[in-house]
Amino acid sequence: MELKQKIYSNLKKVPKGKVITYKELGKAVNSKAYRFVGTCMKENKYPKEIPCYKVVLSDGRIGNYSSSGGVKSKIKKLEADGIKVVNGKVDLKEYLYKL
């Protein structure tokens, strides 16, 4: 399976109410190419099936979101999942999902 597909497959495992970091997704596919994980999120053509809005930075910051509405849209989607976003950050102690 292609690396990008492995990343997407693992992202689909993140349950509602949880987020994952670029680093955790990279580790899940035995890769340190964390920036490539970001590239995969940016290139995601199926955001309804592959929930790229659930991917955040290792310090809990929201990061970018290339789907329509940008970061504001990402925050709305996270909050709709029950994830609190305070000052542009997610509490990873509460919301981080590890594969």
Image: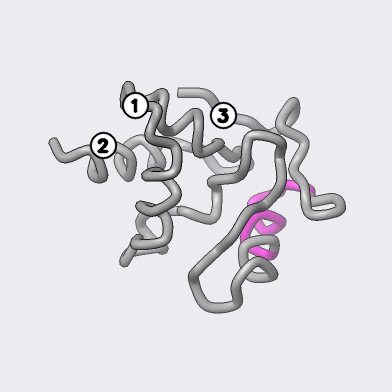
As drawn, is 7 to the left or to the right of 85? left
Using the image, determine if residue 39 lies above or below residue 29.
below
First in sequence, mark 1 or 3: give its number.
1
**Residue where numbered disc 1 is placed:** 31
Q: Residues within 10 Å of mark 3 (few under 14, many from 20)?
A: some
Residue in the picture at 67% in, 52% down: 62
Lower sequence index among marks 1 and 2: 2
Tag 3's secondary structure? loop
Q: Which residues are magenta?
A: 76-84
| Three-letter code for the amino acid on which mark 2 is drawn | Lys
Q: Which residue is mark 3?
A: 97
Q: Which residue is farthest left?
A: 1
Q: Would you call the spot at circle 2 few (<14 residues within 10 Å), some (14-19), or many (20 or more)?
A: some
Give the labeled residue for mark 2: 6
Look at the numbered discs 1 and 3 and tell me whether their residues touch, using CB distance below 8 Å.
no
Q: Most extreme residue toward the bottom, as rendered?
A: 68
Q: Amino acid at mark 1?
A: Ser
